[in-house]
Image: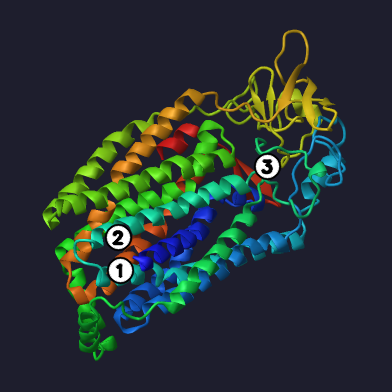
Amino acid sequence: QFFVLCHGLLQLSQLLVSGYLKSSISTIERRYGLSSQTSGLLASFNEVGNTLLIVFVSYFGSRVHRPRLIGCGALLVSLAGFLMSLPHFITGPYEYDRSVASTFSNTTDLCQPGAPGAWANLSNASCTPHASRENHEVLLVMFVAQALLGIGAVPIQPFGISYIDDFASERNSPLYLGILFSVTVIGPGVAFMLGSAMLRFYVDINKVSTAEVQLTNKDPRWVGAWWLGFLVAASLVALSALPYFFFPREMPKEVGEVLHTHTARSPLVLAGFPVVLLRNLRHPVYLLVVLAQVSISAMVAGLATFMGKFLERQFSLTASLANMIIGAVNIPGAMVGIVVGGAILKRFQMSLRQCSALCVLGMLLCLLTAFPLLFLGCPTQRVAGVTYWHSSELGHHDLACNAHCRCPERGFNPVCGSDGVEYTSPCSAGCSTVTLHTDSSVLNYTGCSCVAAPGRAGFARPGTCGTACSHLFVPFVVLSCLAGILASTSHTPSFMLILRSIQPEDKSFAVGIQFMLLRVLAWMPGPVLYGSAIDTTCLLWERRCARRAACRYYDNSLFRHR
């Protein structure tokens, strides 16, 4: 029972590291100009190192000191977490377009007729060889950190599951595994809550004073302190790893049985590897259950990576609020489903056939509940020159009403016109004057030649117009949470189908094969496929030094359906 407690805490901490990346994925995209496909590849890259080693490590699971190997893996995970935060310290401060000249920029993004030179400087000032090299260094560090994270996580779950199942009674094992899986689910939940808290702070909180920052976390240009969470999570993993170096190789309970198994199997070593592999893959129950888990996990991997971004875009939420909803509602709902599934198994002592029926029932109810989510979403906002045109079919910076302004192509400082149309910058709206608060923050823009107003130039306020369908947000959250609960009830029964359908001495190896297939067929391609699909719904891309960077506007209907 103490091992179950320690392992739950370790998996919580380990998933805090990997889950935190998902909570800050849209922020990292904005900070470093990444597409969703690239960020999806980054999110799944930890599976590469994991996949290469997990089967072999699991095969030798009964021949090594499992607790100590778990501890070593945890320390490697901690190192990966610290590396993930490194890009913040090796790059310069975050730069964004400003409405007022400041220490970061000697230009403004107001309409300035006949001043193309200033705009040219704004577009090209940061396009230096050093800037391009810096971006490549950031990606290299992050991909290396993700690979180390995957390698370090190899022994943690397979060895933990098999260690618990070896020394727990057949009656209590489902309950222990159900508790373990539930605590494991809390990890990503806490990660999203941590992301919600950290993204409220400005990214360069350690580099610039708060007085210099002209943004709020509701501004689409806002970038939160994504790196802080990695430091916190990595520290917790390091602390959670310490007890594992003091656990015995074998628990007092059932020592004789385990020792007998160890002695009988030790001569096999690598010679028996192909035999054991084929024996498990030819087992119909094992293979079908794993393939079913692959189908579900591919969907979950993509949704977990981009659900925060989806909520931000569909319902005009801040990154902080989107993470809070996922961490406080959706993930706890999944935890409830896992506990319910484990409790049902313990209460009714289900056979393998009954476990299978419970899994099918849970997934069917989940599909019925999730179907309405295809229709619960917001329309794409009206953006001048992107999704909405007055009378011109020109691009968003080349409307007839702002042709004299010579707006920069890369300028991005969204404003909402008094006509309800969004513009990518005050310059695009043709605004010539800005009114400031006493604290130098922008109150509104006036003299906007592109904003329709009877008999005079209109005005605009800073920020986006939003999607104006907040009434659909609560039904969406309720249905998505309920669908997660129903799907999660099949989690523990599906694991018991695997553990009870194979030979006892193959448990570690079978779980290792299971996780390898999940990684290769679901967790690795899932985020990349979702990211690629999301990129196809982009309406306007940011350009950085002639390369395509992050997406600024999506087609919300396509985003939701794909």
Q: What is the three-letter code of the residue carrying label 1?
A: Ile
Mark 2 vs 1, N-terminal side: 1
Q: Are marks 1 and 3 in contact (CB under 8 Å)?
A: no
Q: CA distance from mark 1 to mark 3?
A: 45 Å
Q: Which residue position is annotated with label 2?
A: 177
Q: Is residue 163 above or below residue 261?
A: above
Between label 1 and label 3, give the one nearer the viewer. Answer: 1
Q: Are marks 2 and 1 in contact (CB under 8 Å)?
A: yes
Q: What is the three-letter code of the residue carrying label 2?
A: Leu
Whether residue 254 sits left or right of residue 154 in the image: it is: left
Q: Secondary structure at mark 3?
A: loop
Q: CA distance from mark 3 to mark 2?
A: 41 Å
**Residue 252 pos. (x, y %):** 28, 78
Local packing at callout 1 (Cα closer than 10 Å; few below 14, some 14-19, many 20+) is some
Q: Is residue 194 above or below residue 438?
A: below
Q: Residue at x 12, y 56 (%)?
A: 351
Label number found at residue 164: 1
Nearest the viewer among 378 and 447 is 378
**Residue 457 pos. (x, y %):** 77, 15
Q: Secondary structure at mark 2?
A: helix
Q: Is residue 315 above or below residue 5?
A: above
Pick the quarter of the image with the N terminus.
Answer: bottom left
Q: Residue at x 34, y 61 (%)?
A: 518
